[in-house]
Amino acid sequence: MTLKVGIVGVRGLSALMGFRSIPDVEVTALCDLDEQMLQAQAQKYQIPHTYRIYEDMLASDVDAVVIATPMQLHFQQTISALQAGKHVLCEVTAGVTMDELWWLKEAVEESKSVYMMAENCCYIPENQIITNMVDAGLFGEVYFGEGEYVHDIKSLAVGDRRNPDKDSTTKTWRSYWQLGKRGAFYPTHSIGPVMKWFKGDRIKSISCVGSGWHTAPQFRQEDTSLTLCQMESGKLIKLRVDCISNRPINAAYYTLQGTEGCYEAPRGLGDTHKIWLKSMGDTPEHAKWRPLSDFHEYLPERYKQASEEQQNTEHWGADFYIVHDFIKAIREGTPVAVDVYEACEWTAVGLLSELSIMNGGRMIDMPDFRKASSYKDQIIRI
């Protein structure tokens, strides 16, 4: 039987090729408020049904929805889909308040539908290699990691979607829900892949500080925010979010340190993914990096077999593999790549960082979304 998919937000069309590569899966519906863009994209990609009203799409015969709208809409659209009996693949973040995260957890637990957060940075090929090397024990015990999202988005805070070439002072949703927030407002791209390397661990507490307002003081978001995540095991993850500074983009920088080796992503200008392992036999004073490409055998087999077109899908090819895992979870009942508990914890890093930074970097405890069983477990103490 054909599984029918609807996409809300034309930005979600980046997942289209992935769906169309799976037998008996069809994207049958597209929803967007912009009628002109909606019809143009539906015609371009031959999607038969279009909707301006999301609830109308949910009332159709689609089996699953992809939510690719602004982040402040994710929770309500996810809940509506689950209540309508639809499976959900939702872009980041999972919600914009702590209450939304608790409501989401409860809704997913009560639902028979599949929910997966589409954190595409977990699918970056190099991050997949590191995951397999961690699993193989090549880094020994990992105890420190870093993730950075450095992306100047000031220009996206104003504009007219209908007339992108026209100068406009109209504030977009990013002016409020991203640059209108303090702290690590957009943490999942940074924390997600690193958390996959800290197997079985969870974030126990976070602390966030900012650099102040220098480049664009009209925004509430500071130039740079640094967040420390203390794990339940005592290990550390450091995050940097910088969407204000005038500099080139580096939205996917990661490091990992273990007892037997380390990894660093490139910074740019010819740099490459690099690794050092104690097993290489170097003495500490003569230790030298090796390119991560030397460890290609740890790339998952499906990445090796992917076509050039698949490898070139958006977000480093991630949008191809994400939908495959989503559909597999629906059809075979396999665990999703990012479940609701991970989605809530990773999203909560940003929400709690706002409390921390506004209280002088105070350490804030992270609730345990997986084990919380009462309203008392939801209390955030300062």
Image (cartoon, rainbow, N blue to C red):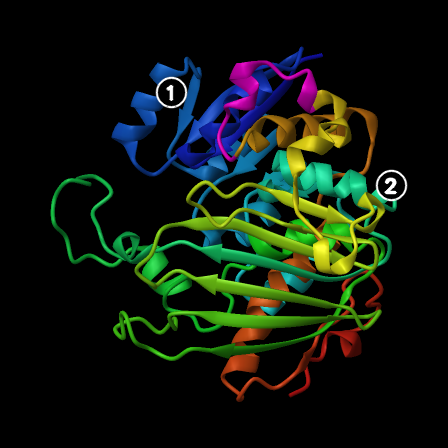
Which quadrant of the figure contains the C terminus? bottom right
Q: Is residue 94 visible?
A: no
**Residue 46 in the image: above or below residue 68:** above
Task: Residue at 82% x, 51% y: name it.
Answer: 278
Q: Is residue 204 left or right of residue 251?
A: right
Residue 136 badge: 2
Instruction: Give 282 or 176, whichever is nearer the viewer.
Output: 282
Q: Is residue 175 visible?
A: yes
Task: Residue at 47% x, 33% y: name it.
Answer: 12
Q: Where are the magenta residues, as a range?
A: 303-315
Q: Residue furthest left?
A: 167
Residue 381 within the magenta-colored segment of the rendering: no
* Kind of residue indicated by mark 2: Ala
Question: Residue 155's spot in the image, x, y percent?
Answer: 26, 54
Question: Residue 91's spot in the image, x, y percent?
Answer: 55, 44
SS assignment at label 2: loop
Q: Which of the two discs, 2 and 1, sits closer to the camera?
A: 2
Label 1, on which residue?
42
* Kind of residue indicated by mark 1: Ala
Q: Is residue 171 left or right of residue 45?
A: left
- Label 2: how many residues lie within 10 Å, few (<14), some (14-19) or many (20+)? few
Residue at mark 2 to residue at mark 1: CA–CA distance? 45 Å
**Which label's residue is closer to the chain start, 2 or 1?**
1
- Label 1: how many residues lie within 10 Å, few (<14), some (14-19) or many (20+)? some
Q: Is residue 108 left or right of residue 81?
A: right
